[in-house]
Image (spheres, grey):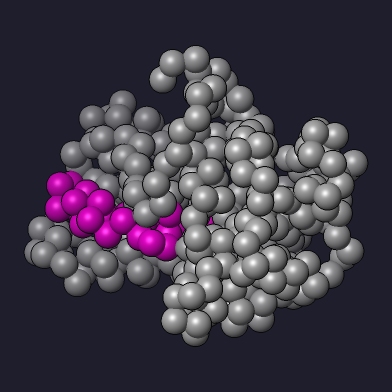
């Protein structure tokens, strides 16, 4: 990577939006408090000053209204980036997303596209309590017509968001809150990362951890610790859940013959089940030397208390225990 510097995850997201808005006048940005206030997490700092109120549009506190407006503008030629302050608020405008945005291309025989990105802060770890800390990605993955992206690094956040903005489908772009301050190398020159392609975050030979979002960093920490004992852990970062890179999942399972699936969202009926079935339905199943383990969130609303909140999500200790079980 030439001309690479270290920037935060939130800066990478902002750069992606600004570059795409400069590149295409049909791209615009709207949401609650995104202008002067710069958004709840400071992502849109300086954008209203550069692009003005026409292209950085402050909205009322009505997700139903502004997501619906996003759908309408997308089918008439615009490319909206819609920010929902917290991913939990998708419950307010779920009809606009699953019955309108996701269905129109199909129901109009391909004559209509809905090129909209819904960016939203997901997940816990910030003490925001049960209505502001959920990881609901499995709900969006169950809806045909939506693409679902969860980047784990600043580099991926920028490259995947640029691809999402250029995509002709509605993309749910989930930014886990705990990652906003994380720094990483990001090139200054233009680049995109294709949707639907996983990334091998760490190569290994003894066991594969298949994960995404902030659990990638936690899994890498565990892998580094276990390496000191001679245990070689491979970490596969899915990056995009829909479309899913099934080939990468099957490849790593066949290679190491042991698999642990890790995600922050609730383990029961979570996305990890799709990973397990992908392996079980392929020839990789016959390579396995141990049952597949899952590590997910506990089946409870996310607590406000910091200690209880931390215990509700996967921890390095739980990931390590699952890896040791498979070995």
Drawn side of residue 150 relative to residue 208, left or right: right
**Residue 40 drawn at (x, y percent):** 80, 47
Q: Nearer the viewer, residue 133 or 107?
A: 107
Is residue 39 shown in magenta? no
Drawn side of residue 76 relative to residue 137, left or right: right
Outermost residue toward the top in this view:
3
Residue 240 seen from this side = yes
| Above-or-below relation of 238 to 106 | above
- Viewport quadrant of the N terminus: top left
Residue at the (11%, 65%) spot, across then down = 283
Q: Which residues are magenta?
A: 240-266
Is residue 250 shown in magenta? yes
Residue at the (15%, 47%) spot, across then down = 255
| Above-or-below relation of 292 to 7 | below
Residue at the (55%, 34%) spot, across then down = 154
| Above-or-below relation of 307 to 301 | above
**Residue 114 drawn at (x, y percent):** 57, 67
């Amino acid at each position: 990577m030439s001309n690479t510097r270290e920037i935060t995850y939130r800066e990478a997201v902002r750069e992606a939006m600004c570059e795409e808005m400069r590149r295409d006048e049909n791209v615009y940005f709207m949401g609650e408090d995104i202008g002067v206030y710069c958004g709840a997490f400071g992502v849109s700092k300086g954008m209203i000053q550069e692009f003005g109120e026409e292209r950085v549009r402050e909205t009322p506190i009505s997700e139903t209204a502004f997501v619906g407006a996003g759908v309408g503008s997308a089918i008439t030629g615009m490319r909206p980036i819609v920010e929902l302050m917290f991913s939990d608020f998708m419950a307010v405008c779920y009809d606009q997303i699953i019955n309108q945005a996701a269905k129109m291309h199909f129901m109009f025989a391909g004559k209509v596209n809905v090129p909209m990105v819904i960016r939203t802060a997901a997940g816990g770890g910030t003490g925001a309590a049960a209505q502001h800390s959920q990881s609901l990605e499995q709900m969006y993955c169950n809806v045909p017509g939506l693409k679902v992206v969860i980047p784990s690094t600043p580099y991926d956040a920028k490259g995947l968001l640029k691809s999402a903005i250029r995509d002709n489908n509605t993309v749910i772009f989930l930014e886990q809150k705990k990652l906003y301050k994380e720094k990483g190398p990001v090139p200054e020159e233009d680049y995109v990362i294709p949707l639907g392609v996983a990334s091998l975050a760490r190569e290994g030979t003894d066991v594969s951890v298949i994960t995404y979002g902030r659990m990638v960093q936690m899994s890498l920490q565990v892998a580094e610790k276990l390496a000191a004992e001679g245990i070689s852990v491979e970490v596969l970062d899915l990056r995009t859940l829909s479309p899913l890179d099934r080939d990468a999942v099957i490849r790593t399972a066949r290679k190491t013959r042991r698999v642990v699936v890790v995600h922050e969202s609730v383990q029961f009926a979570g996305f990890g089940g799709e990973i397990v079935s992908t392996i079980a339905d392929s020839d990789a199943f016959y390579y396995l030397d141990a049952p597949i383990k899952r590590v997910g969130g506990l089946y409870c609303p996310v607590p406000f208390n910091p200690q209880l909140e931390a215990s509700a999500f996967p921890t390095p200790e739980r990931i390590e225990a699952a890896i040791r079980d498979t070995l």
